Image (tube, rainbow, N blue to C red):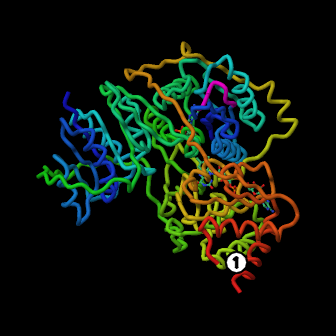
Amino acid sequence: MTSNIIVFSEDSKIINDALHVAYSLSEKTGNLIALTNSDENAEEYFRNFDEVYVTKKDLMPDQWASLLRKVFLEKNANYVIAPHTVNNNDILSFLSAKEGMHMVSNALSFQEKGDYYVFSRQVIGGRGISYIEISKNEKIALTVPLKVYPKINLNKSPLVKEITEIPNSKINFAGFEERKRSGVNIENADIVIGVGRGFKNKEDLKLAQELADAINGVVGCSRPIAADYGWLPNDLWIGISSKIIKPKLYIAVGISGAPQHVSGIMDSKVIVAINKDKNASIFKYADYGVVADLYQFLPTLTKKIKEMKK
Amino acid sequence: MVNIAVLAKISLNLNLLKIESNGKINTAESPLAISEYDKNALEEALRIREKFGGKVICISVLTWGPVNKKLQDAERIMRETLALGVDEAHLVVDDYFDSCSPLETSLAIASVLRKLGNFDLYLCGESSMDVSSAQIPARIASILDIPFITYVAKIRIEENKIFFHRELPNGVQIIEAQPPLVVSVTGEINQPRLPTLKQILQSKNKPLIKYTLKDLQIETKAGKLNQWMEVRPVIRKNIIYEGSKLEEIAQDLINNLIQEGVLKI
Ligand SMILES: Cc1cc2nc3c(=O)[nH]c(=O)nc-3n(C[C@H](O)[C@H](O)[C@H](O)COP(=O)(O)OP(=O)(O)OC[C@H]3O[C@@H](n4cnc5c(N)ncnc54)[C@H](O)[C@@H]3O)c2cc1C
Ligand SMILES: Nc1ncnc2c1ncn2[C@@H]1O[C@H](COP(=O)(O)O)[C@@H](O)[C@H]1O
């Protein structure tokens, strides 16, 4: 069975991640067909495809979804693969429902097992992995994580077609507000202090900052501190729906240890937890746990470190 | 008047998972809980109804079986949504849906929705807390053939226009659109209320309607998938300090961290 594969991304800059998976699935047969947008650097990565459908316009998800369906049906494709983003995942879900297909969101890996592929993906807020067996004969849609695959270069001479007929959108774009960034890269820091809802006020976060300053660390946070309270910028929020970190030392302060948070710190070398509730789940994930009120313990810890430095 | 269908998932309770010695999650023995962000979807629906009037119904497909073990827990969760203020609850319970995929779940939801007629808004959570596929909202929109707007952290109604603020990784995208719409919300959109005792008592008299596979029209050529879940093992030292001698604890902790090579002073 030949299997044409559509590699889709509303943003062509990240299409490589999906291409990689498509390429391993397609090795024996089938054409690689891209549907994406284009910019001045597009030429280079388009050379990895047999055919390219491209638009220079900014489209809404529903417009992409109709274009994708059109190409999918025209090319009688078996697989659609996209890098995992909010919009790409929505667009593939929309297509999958129309075509009665299964879809695996954010598939980490796949293995062949006889007539099946076994895909894995994160579940339980990232604490668990689910394994999903899908017959090789089924048509499927996949989204795959960003930034895990090396660049490839297949050097083909693709047929590039610009899409001219664009369906109307039923929703209207009404603005975009850039998010403010901290400028701190918590993914590269050796020491991260994570602050959570155990802090009562924004001003109290200085207790964590003082500790961070004393040990050359940076402050990160749980989701509510950024998303609900806006006490810190979103790029400092740690966990499955934001940053995954692997510092040498992670100190969780006033954080309960929800799976969605913990999955973002699992690969830290040493984990310390400070929490006043001795049953808090964060202690299960900690090498060292201190059952104490952070308002008393943090200043004590910072003071000791400063004394030792002298 | 705004009529709203809230899609609420009866999820595995992440704090009470039953994990076997080989790491596999025993879903049959794990208790259930309403998925976290579906509480926000419910809350948003109730707030819209308070302002504009209308009806709020809740739909759920029980995807964790076996039904004979899970029915009570599932009904309790649906009663909770009624206690919060939902007018009617609709629950699909059939062993066919045990550990099913988003494909089957969305077909079942859509089939119940078709029986109930049209709604202005179909509110979902951004993703469910157990499997987090984030497929259901766009799938439902696709089957109903209406637009979808996902990851909404704010709904703003101005005269005849409705604005949706989408939380995307690099910023907030604002969309204007007219119902009918499928909308998924983030946890930041509101702070869900708790039911009053009176509401809890009243919920017993509200309709909770159950469906099995034979009540639904579900056609699919795709096969059902085999799937299972495992938990990643945690290997940590778990040294716990307790007590009031904070200075000593701090000193001991610092010494250990220096010895581990993760702290330099
Ligand atoms: C789909 C989904 C994705 C999510 N993604 C993320 C994510 O990426 N990152 C994330 O962090 N969360 C995420 N969450 C949210 C997550 O489920 C939790 O709600 C969140 O992590 C809780 O944050 P917290 O630990 O700061 O607050 P809480 O759970 O409220 O914990 C506060 C802790 O502080 C302790 N405390 C209180 N006072 C003190 C004191 N004086 N001294 C010491 N300790 C004190 C309490 O004992 C408690 O344990 C997600 C949820 C869902 C459903
Ligand atoms: N079994 C279900 N019954 C009702 N609603 C569901 C179900 N599964 C998912 N949903 C809805 O779809 C959203 C996204 O779920 P998911 O696609 O599983 O990440 C949830 O927050 C619910 O609003």
Q: In the image, residue A228 lies at what x, y percent?
A: 66, 59
Quadrant location of the N terminus of chain B in the rendered image:
top right
**Residue B161 appears anywhere in the view:** no
Front-most of A82 and A72? A82
Left or right relative to A304: residue B26: left
Task: Indicate whether residue A11 is drawn in magenta.
Answer: no
* Residues drawn in magenta: B25-31
**Residue at image location 66% in from the left, 35% down from the top:** B17
Left or right relative to A293: residue B179: left
Quadrant location of the C terminus of chain B in the rendered image:
bottom right
Task: Establish if B150 lies above or below B83.
Answer: below
Task: Indicate whether residue B27 is drawn in magenta.
Answer: yes
Q: Using the rendered view, name the quadrant where residue A37 is placed.
A: bottom left
Quadrant location of ligand 1?
Answer: bottom right
Front-most of B144 and B96? B96
**Residue at image location 54% in from the left, 65% down from the top:** A235
**Residue B179 appears anywhere in the view:** yes
Q: In the image, residue A264 lies at what x, y percent?
A: 56, 55
Task: Establish if A191 lies above or below B71.
Answer: below
Left or right relative to A23: residue B218: right
Three-letter code, disc 1: Glu
Q: Number of numbered discs present?
A: 1
Of all residues, the one furthest to the bottom in this rendering is A310
Badge 1 marks a residue whose secondary structure is helix
Of all residues, the one furthest to the top in this rendering is B214
Q: In the image, residue A30 lies at what x, y percent?
A: 18, 36
Q: In the image, residue A60 lies at what x, y percent?
A: 39, 52
Task: Establish if B143 lies above or below A38.
Answer: above
Q: Dot 1 corresponds to which residue?
A: A210
Left or right relative to A222: residue A144: left
